[in-house]
Amino acid sequence: MKKTLLLTENFPPKQGGSSRWFWELYSRLPTNKVLVIANNTKGGREWDAIHSILIERLPLSSTEWGLKSLTGLAFYIRSTWALFKIIKARNIEEVHCGRVIPEGVIARILNLVTTIRYRCYVHGEDVESAATSREQSLLVREVCRKALSLICNSQNTINLVEKLGYSDSDKCYLLHPGVDLERFVPAPTDIDIQERLGWSQKRVLLTVGRLQRRKGQDFLIKAMPSLLKRFPDLFYAIVGQGDCYDELQDLIDSNDLSENVKIYPKMSDEQLVQCYQQCDLVILPNRTIGNDIEGFGMVLVEAQACGKPVIAGRSGGTAETMIVGETGFLIDCTSPDRLVDELLPLLGLQPLIPDQNAPREHVLQHFSWVRHVEKARGHFSQ
């Protein structure tokens, strides 16, 4: 394996599927071959100090990702110069970019200056969002043109890359995110944990993910009054942080749902696993909003690893996380009414899936990190 620099704004302690994915993959690669350059997020240096992988922190956040604005131009000049010095000092042979933009743009500029080669991860929502801007579309197209490969998290993302004209499928490599099968495991009902979470005697629907509109927490909150008429013991638990926190809390309050819906913005890794283990099912009521889509849905894989059935929106790459009808279901989440119409019949099924072992078995066969790392290393060596 070449000496590799992973360049990513999204990395622990920042929460999110991409952050976990990069940590789980690159921490399993030879430590003498990997350097991570991550954003200097709050708590980052403290997190780095207790982990063995080599990590350096730089300011990788910007309000502008285009080159036409002074803010964006200054960001790229500063970032490229900092990376140039690190690459020379560390004898880096290849750069892996957490996204096509802005990380891929930085790598493309470095490629012009140093001829260093790079690969880019593509998540779906990133290239869809870029398609709304002519300038960003041109940047993405140029980054894709010179990349060694585009590592896509789902077949849906590969289809998007082709559809938007950024590249053909020959340059795309499918690499589904994996899951830690020693951490995400089934567990028996624990009354003490359920009481601590406020879930006692409740039928718990759990959503894990950033608080943003495409995740669909808002529509499920709006659907809860109708769902509660049929199933009065329902409880909707939302784990995550994000820009929509105040909006979602207002929805809970305005619908008088404080006894039936709760947001948990701060959960440790251990507590997150406990939430998966103690809930009844995990739901990601995602929908497409403009060009913002759910590229894959890593939380659905984590839930199945804990033995839980899953339900997701019929949008983006969520279908690739499950065996539809056996480990989970897809429903229309484009409005609260449609969500109610399709979720109610499923909630009436007892049990929801015929084989309670199927979710875990599915993940064991397809999403183990051992399998994932083998595939990744094979690709990186090409």
Image (cartoon, rainbow, N blue to C red):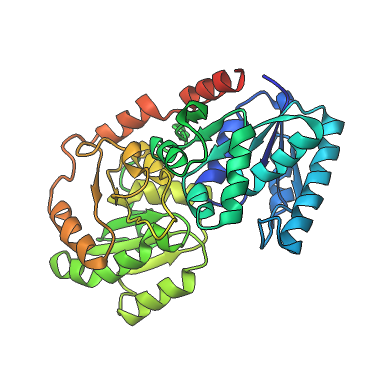
- Give me the residue at 13% from left, 49% from top: 349
Q: Is residue 109 visible?
A: yes
**Against 189, is 194 above or below?**
below
Residue 200 image offset from top left, x and y in percent: 29, 61
Q: Residue at x 13, y 55 (%)?
A: 345
Q: Quadrant of residue 321?
A: top left
User: With respect to residue 355, does 349 lie above or below?
Assistant: below
* Percent position of residue 213, x then y: 42, 63
Where the N terminus falls, by quadrant? top right
Q: Is residue 130 left or right of residue 74?
A: left
For the image shown, how many numbered marks are present on the structure?
0
Res. 10 in view: no
Q: Which residue is found at the position 51% from the left and 63% from the top?
A: 242
Left or right of residue 225, residue 371 in this image: right
* Percent of width and height locating residue 178: 46, 33
State the residue in front, 270 or 257: 257
